[in-house]
Image (cartoon, helix red, strand yellow):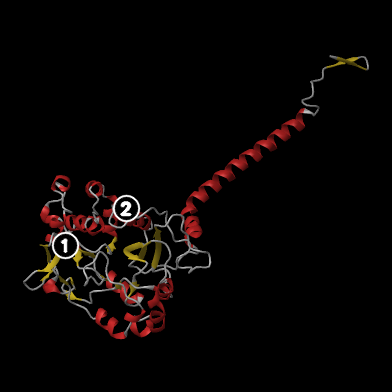
Amino acid sequence: MISEGGRLVDKKPLKGYLPERICRVICSLALVFLLSFLVSSLFFYLLTAALSPLLTSLIRYGAPAEPADAGGRIAFMFLTRGPLPLAPLWEKFFQGHEGRYAVYVHASQPNFTFPSNFSPVFVDRQIPGGKVEWGRMSVVAAERRLLAYAVTDKRNEYFVLVSESCIPLWSFDYVYNYIASTHISFVEAHTDPFDEAFGRYLPDIHMPAIRRKDFLKGSQWFVLQRRHAELVVQDTEHYLVHSKSCQWRAQHSKYCCSDEHYLQILLALKDPAGISRFPVTLADWSQWRFHPETYYSHNMSDALFKTIKSTKHFIQYRYYWKKFKNRYSYIEHPKKPQPAPTVENGFCAVEGTVRNCFLFARKFHVSSLPYLLKNSQHVLGF
């Protein structure tokens, strides 16, 4: 109570030296501002979450691709050591077909990245890589890593594995129509008695998941339909079996080469009618070495490509071991070559229709690039 002019006046204390009414107004405004901030923050969070796939795509893969055809895109997966010496040819192959393909690159060289001025087809297309050793399980791990990244994009319907020494033999349209016109995957898979002699089949490890008659062999370079790509990514049983086999062979200083067995056996067991059994990537194994022959500049000719591209007959030659002077060597079976199983009369046939066998070829040296670029139109069709 305060005396004011002889009268007692009851005055309430000020809050922070401001009238109570002003304090209430400020508090109300602060509350409104806080609520607005929270609402806007929540909206921004939801918007960001909704757009995150697009933002990730923009950051990692550049501008959004044009709408793909109804059949979906082809994911080209490059399994490389590092540089891509034939990139200019692939860039020419892809030109004008944006929206119909995606590129993924796995480089085994530590910390390898393409320079910013490299082909835009490949820059920022690398996935996290890892060390890859020839003949080891790390090759299969790299293939599965590429597939795992590629299948996350629902627009990808077909999955092609190629190396830095691979080239396309036909135009993009031809390759696309060849792959998209069928429901099978192009995976080479055949029996080979050589595998048993070489000790790749280990009953104590492979059984019961893989019986001897189911132990198949084939080229690692494949073309998969989406259902098969997902099956490979989701598999654990067969991957563990082959990993154990590789561990045993590594302890005995031997290669396991599971890239020639793992995927081939898995798909042949899970969907035997769903794979071609013949490869669509050509390689010259005529010298029977650990690696196929390499095509150099002096090997380039129109006749070479005419022969390769007109091939419609795929024969799997059977070879056996022969001991000679304490060394093992190959000898051809005395009988005529036998066609690979399920390949119709030895021809590259898909659902009853005979086709040209090969879409891609390897191994091409960088010295062949000038010829390929100069003659790509009449030799390769693009």
> Residue 315 location in percent, x, y?
15, 72
| Residue bearing mark 1 | 273
Dot 1: within a 10 Å radius of its alpha carbon, few (fewer than 14), some, or many (20 or more) residues? few
> Residue 54 location in percent, x, y?
48, 57
Q: Nearer the viewer, residue 4 or 209?
A: 209
Q: Which numbered disc flags the more N-terminal residue, 2 or 1?
A: 2
Residue 126 quadrant:
bottom left
- Helix, strand or loop at label 1? It is helix
- From this viewpoint, which residue is outermost toward the left? 335
User: Taking 93 as reference, is 164 above or below it?
Assistant: above
Q: State the mark number for residue 336.
A: none
Q: Nearer the viewer, residue 177 or 221?
A: 221
Q: Residue flagged by tag 1: what amino acid is it? A: Ala
Q: Is residue 309 left or right of residue 370?
A: left
Q: Quadrant of the C terminus?
A: bottom left
Residue 155 quadrant:
bottom left
| Residue bearing mark 2 | 138
Q: Quadrant of the N terminus?
A: top right
User: Taking 240 as reference, is 100 above or below it?
Assistant: below
Q: Is residue 359 left or right of residue 124?
A: left
For image coordinates 68% across by 35% down, the residue present is 28
User: Taking 136 as reference, is 82 above or below it?
Assistant: below
For image coordinates 55% across by 44% down, the residue present is 42
> Residue 122 location in percent, x, y?
45, 65
Q: Is residue 325 left or right of residue 170?
A: left
Nearest-to-viewer mark from 2 and 1? 2
Q: Is residue 189 left or right of residue 59?
A: left
